Image: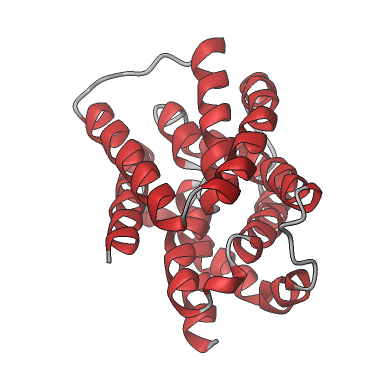
Amino acid sequence: MAVLAATLVIGAAVQGLVGLGLGLVAAPVTMMLEPQLMPDLMLWLAMLLPMGTLAREHQDIYWRGLGWSLGARAPGTVVGVALVAAFSTRSLGIAVGLMVLLTVLLTARAVVIPVNRGTLVAAGFASGITGTATSIGGPPLAILLQHRRPRQIRTTLAVYFLLGAALSLTGLLVAGRLEPQILLLAVLLSPCLVLGLALARLLHGVVPRDRARWAVLGVCGSSAVVLLVRSLV
């Protein structure tokens, strides 16, 4: 449990810096140590952590983009629940890892994805699938918003994670695949999130504005590699 707690601190700090990171850092460790807690634990924590972020920063949220992406996340959540029931975690991890890694590589080579109604809907739908099935739903929207201001990325993703995780948890509950008692464990681990956010506040200068895009891409790319390794091993 100490290893899991330390991982949550690191993941919360990364998310406090670049807008995402809790699931990317902590989900693989949770899967290795306590697979029976997945994806429930990470989804509960993904809903709790943004509350701390939004208590500190709640300006510059991209509400229009959230409307389109969250609207599409609902049907994506339904697909994600179906995939959890139909496919193995290994198969889902390989598919998601390859998708995220390919998107990061294309985007890093100056392929600019326009932020419009179509791309926001696509990102929300894909995030609903991956977030529900693997608890890692941030990369599609984060890659789309990578050229925005760092604070807008952080606050917009915070709202998205809060509401998106609630949708995924509701979907799993309706499907009978949610263990409500894991919420208690999430609450007990919540001080790790507070500590991570405090650490992020001290380290904000490490990620200057002009490098925030590369930080987002780095976190997303790392998550893809971790997912692939975790799924193949």
Q: Nearer the viewer, residue 5 or 227?
A: 227
Left of 37 or right of it: where is 104?
Answer: left
Residue at position x 63%, y 56% in the image: 46
x then y, percent, for residue 2: 52, 88
Q: Quadrant of residue 107?
A: top left
x then y, percent, for residue 169: 73, 51
Residue at position x 52%, y 72% in the image: 35
Residue at position x 36%, y 53% in the image: 223
Residue 202 showing in the rendered view: no
x then y, percent, for residue 125: 57, 28
Q: Nearer the viewer, residue 191 or 45?
A: 45
Extreme residue in the bottom direction: 2
Residue 161 showing in the rendered view: yes
Extreme residue in the front direction: 86
x then y, percent, for residue 100: 35, 39
If the image is split into quadrants, where does the N terminus sit? bottom right
Left of 125 or right of it: where is 78?
Answer: right
Left of 178 or right of it: where is 68?
Answer: left
Extreme residue in the left direction: 109
Q: Nearer the viewer, residue 171 or 195?
A: 171
Colour mode of the rendering = secondary structure
Number of marks: 0
